[in-house]
Image (cartoon, grey):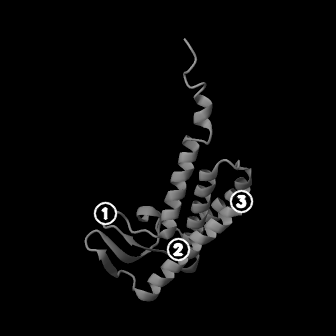
Amino acid sequence: MPIVILALAVIALDQVSKAYLQANMVPGASVPVIPGIFHITYVLNPGAAFGILEHQRWFFVAVALLLVAVIVYLYPRIPAGYGLLRLGIALQTGGAAGNAIDRLKTGYVVDFFDFRVWPVFNVADMAIVGGVALIVYSILFPPGKGKADEGDGGDAPD
């Protein structure tokens, strides 16, 4: 159940932030928050990260739906001790759903965080990246693995 709550919170924050932006700015507009470093820039992105696969709306919607289906199937099988993995999956699910909602509504994803040295992104993108990072960390460093490999800590006489 916590995965649903966190995923819904990500979706809500993502959609509310995008709705606020759309109600108060026009596409292409940019407002400097820290001039030259961080701006709020209204971008309609027809692709994925870095604009790849532009205008592949139904491909991205299908991938998001597939991701959610796989998560619904696999999530109950994740051991309770894998909290970071569960958190990562919840973030990734919410982010994928948030961007899929945009694609279904308009065919574009609304992006607005602009650090001027990186492509413009949104709340859903942050959740996806954070979720992937937690998933990778959980795979590389599974819970309890370090304790099992430590043995007796080296206190035994030679």
Q: Quadrant of the C terminus?
A: top right
Which residue type carries mark 3?
A: Val
Q: Nearer the viewer, mark 2 or mark 1?
A: 2
Residue bearing mark 2: 14
The crowding category of the residue bearing disc 1, from other C-alpha atoms within 10 Å (few below 14, some 14 to 19, many at least 20), is few
Residue 58 can be seen, yes or no? no
Asked where in the image residue 72 lies, by quadrant, the reply is: bottom right
Residue bearing mark 3: 72
Asked where in the image residue 89 lies, by quadrant, the reply is: bottom right
In the drawing, does residue 77 fall left or right of residue 144? right
Residue bearing mark 1: 117
In the drawing, does residue 123 fall left or right of residue 12? left
Which residue type carries mark 2?
A: Asp
Does residue 52 lie above or below 27 as drawn?
above
Say what secondary structure mark 1 lies in. loop
**What whole-number distance in Å separates the C-alpha atoms at marks 3 and 2?**
21 Å
Which residue sits at x=60%, y=42%? Answer: 142
Residue sitting farthest toward the left: 36
Which residue sits at x=47%, y=84%? Answer: 20
Query: Residue 27 got which mark?
Result: none
Say what secondary structure mark 3 lies in. helix
Q: Quadrant of the N terminus?
A: bottom right
Say what secondary structure mark 2 lies in. helix
Asked where in the image residue 119 lies, by quadrant, the reply is: bottom left
Q: Earlier in the sequence, mark 2 or mark 1?
A: 2
Q: Earlier in the sequence, mark 1 or mark 3?
A: 3
Which residue type carries mark 1?
A: Val
Residue 11 can be seen, yes or no? yes
**What whole-number distance in Å separates the C-alpha atoms at marks 2 and 1?**
22 Å
Q: Earlier in the sequence, mark 3 or mark 2?
A: 2
